[in-house]
Amino acid sequence: MTERILSGIRATGRLHFGNFLGAVRNFVKFQTPGNTCLYFVADLHTLTTLENPAQLRDNLIEMVKDYIAAGLDPEQSIIYAQSSVPEISELSLLLGMLQPLGQLQLIPTFKEMVRKHPNNVNLGLITYPVLMAADILGPRATLVPVGEDQVPNVELARNLAERFNNRFGDDMFVVPKMMDQMIKVPGLDGSKMGKSEADNAIDINANAEQIRARYTKGVTDSKKVRANDSGEPYRCLSVYPVHKLVSSGNGCVGVEALAKIEAGCRSGFLSCVACKDILARNIAQLLGPFQEKRAALASKDDYVRDVLNDGGKRARTAIQETVGLVRERMGIIVY
Ligand code: AMP
């Protein structure tokens, strides 16, 4: 079955390994003949927390380089900046009329932002999922590959699509699907790897030695005190869960089989230091091809601007028509 795939990432800085594994690697997987893929950088969403305009402009270009280096092909996928399609903002406003405020206040990512930044709870933060719904519904995406943390936001987009269809005609929006399996990559402290102040992320440009150095502060099984103590992989918060994602040979590289790592941890034969070393090598091997391509793109800003110009036009064409119909069905005539 052919799909219309859509996803995006905020331009808050360079991608980290959580974005790479949880999101971008799937973007590439879906880039197959027959699928229409739209991948954007969510620069408007970024404004909810980022205040430095020059940095935002730089981040946008650098993230598109990351996308391309990871395997997105501008010939096959529409790569664009969210702000290049003003109709998305208009659609967000229109969909907002159908969205109860109370539900938005319960979204986990909103609650987390309020907890972290109680003095900067701007309107953009609360309407964040509605803008995301406009991103998704505008081009009538059928499948939205995201990490596990984004499930409530995609659910909200699905609800909005259904609500609109019930009120204004059931042929308007496709109710988008999510992937069968989504992941959450833990950071060094065991919480979700993120770009935030937690400083728990692995840089996707790091080499094996740098990754190994970062994992020295990775939180493992607290009961495995000495190197040769017997451990329990499922008590390990930051290393074993990532081994499960990258060391299984399950579409990933596997320098050491996962089963061997588990057995070594339990028997005490494998120390946490050695286990982290294997993980660092596996991650470095996984990132090698990306890093090579990324280095070749380092000075190609003009090329990236061309990609964004072209992608912006193509995305606008894909979205404009839907927004025109939504406007009309809601009773708005443009004179
Ligand atoms: P963000 O960086 O919050 O804009 O997220 C961009 C995409 O990366 C979304 O699809 C997220 O679900 C995904 N993502 C971010 N962090 C992680 C993580 N630690 N594990 C898995 N996916 C993630």
Image (cartoon, rainbow, N blue to C red):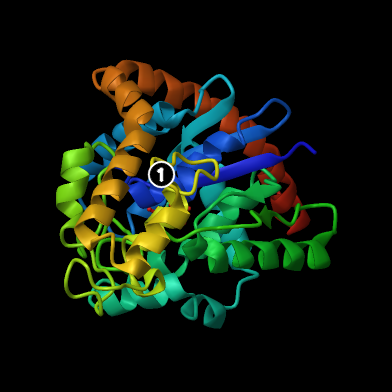
Q: Quadrant of residue 100?
A: bottom right
Please tell me which residue lies in front, 37 or 125.
37
Image position, residue 202 (x, y; %): 26, 49
Asked if ligand 1 lies within 8 A of label 1, the reply is no
Asked if residue 195 lies left or right of residue 91, the reply is left
Please tell me which residue lies in front, 303 or 285.
285
Residue 12 appears in the picture as rendered: no
152 versus 74 height, above or below: below
Asked if residue 171 lies left or right of residue 286, the reply is right
Q: Residue at x 36, y 69 (%)?
A: 266
Q: Quadrant of residue 30?
A: top right
Ligand 1 resides in the quarter of the picture at bottom left
Residue 249 appears in the picture as rendered: yes
Q: Residue at x 57, y 28 (%)?
A: 77
309 versus 18 height, above or below: above
Tell me the residue that label 1 is attached to. Answer: 20
Given the image, on which type of amino acid does mark 1 rest? Phe
Image position, residue 78 (x, y; %): 55, 29
Q: Residue at x 56, y 79 (%)?
A: 103
Q: How many marks?
A: 1
Please tell me which residue lies in front, 256 or 28.
256
Secondary structure category for the residue under label 1: helix
Quarter of the image with the C terminus in it:
top right
